[in-house]
Amino acid sequence: MTVLSTMVFADISGSTALFEALGNERATEAVTQMTRRIGDALQACGGRVVKTLGDGVLGIFGDAAGAVAATATLLRQQQARQGRWPQPVRMDLRVGVASGEVVEVDGDCYGDAVNVASRLCERAGAGEIWATETTVLLAGAAPEVWYRKMGLLEIRGKSELQMLYQVEWREDEAPDSLTMQATLMSSFAPEDSVLGQIQFSWHGVDHTFSSSDVPVLLGRATTAQLCINDPRVSRLHARIDWRNGGFVLTDMSSFGTWVRFEGSDSPVRLRRDGCLLHGTGEIALGVSFMESSAPVIRFHVAGTSVHLV
């Protein structure tokens, strides 16, 4: 029987490092306990655990709003626990959510939504929830979450680019420049009153984007607004968003991104996390600035409301 459902795939980000730090026995115990907590959280919000896959859990929900609310609750609970745990056993979670027709056979689930949820989980960074546009539209007014449009992105196994969103779950996250539930059909929140521009220079060519042009994708793919033709650069390597009056760079790559601001000798390394861009500086993609041949983009930011002391 085929039923419209929402699939949730949640797993532990960086579990390999956990095994290196704790050893096989203690790490296995910690991972088992964590996957049990994930399953309990999904079931407490009306979902059903389909199966556990190593350090991940696949769950199914009858409604998208319940699935989104459950994932937000799960990450809030984990954030609260992290503060009480010693550093070696801290575990970040990442989540993918997708909706579609699903076939259930003997308790297991099959369908495109199952595969997409897993792929989104792979792409999400630590502490992130990635969701398809169908899920976001179906979820609508999920309590205490906002949606940030990430644009058309490639998903492994899909022939066409998919419109994806990030579910903002942190309670102190300001909703400025996020896509609110009430404005989903227009896909954008009200425009920020402050306009900004960011200029990138690559091999002598300048590319300028305004705050209304975001998201801007950097990568090797020809679909990226800033295409960097270098084998060390991921197809979709990084994303530029406009948040709270400033440009934020988020790494989405396999090998990382480095940011070096003018006047500073210490680069900021990004690994599936973000950094506020300000002033003038350089971005190294895939390899650090220590590599003389690293693909390096210069940037200059103007007209933001961000003031640094």
Image: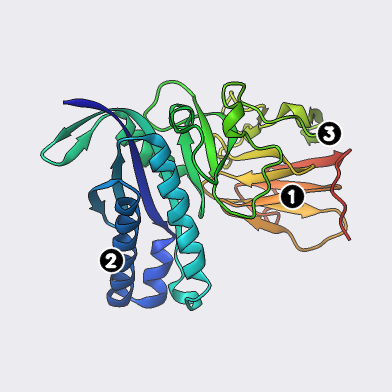
Answer above or below: position of 156 versus 291. above
Q: Nearer the viewer, mark 3 or mark 2?
A: 3
Distance between mark 2 and mark 1 Cα atoms? 36 Å
Amino acid type at mark 2: Thr
For the C terminus, the quadrant is bottom right
Q: Nearer the viewer, residue 13 or 228?
A: 13
Amino acid type shown at disc 1:
Leu
Ranked by sequence position, the earlier of labels 3 and 2 is: 2
Picture residue at 34% right of the left edge, 64% below the top: 34
Residue located beneath label 3 in the image = 193
The residues tagged by marks 3 and 2 sit, at their Cα atoms, a distance apart of: 48 Å
Q: Position of residue 146 (x, y in %)?
A: 58, 41
Q: First in sequence: mark 3 or mark 1?
A: 3
Amino acid residing under circle 3: Ser
Q: Is residue 220 visible?
A: no
Q: Position of residue 174 (x, y in %)?
A: 68, 48
State how far apart marks 3 and 1 are (Cα). 19 Å
Residue 301 x, y percent position in the rendering: 84, 41
Q: How many marks?
A: 3
- The residue under label 1 is 276
Query: Of residues 201 and 120, which is closer to you in this image?
Result: 120
Task: Give me the disc on residue 32.
Answer: 2
Q: Is residue 230 visible?
A: yes
Q: Residues within 10 Å of mark 1 (few under 14, many from 20)?
A: some
Image colouring: rainbow
Question: Residue at the spot x=55%, y=44% of the render?
Answer: 145
Question: For residue 96, what is the image quadrant?
Answer: top left
Crowding around mark 2 (Cα neighbors within 10 Å: few <14, some 14 to 19, many 20+) is: some
Marks 2,1: beta carbons within 8 A: no
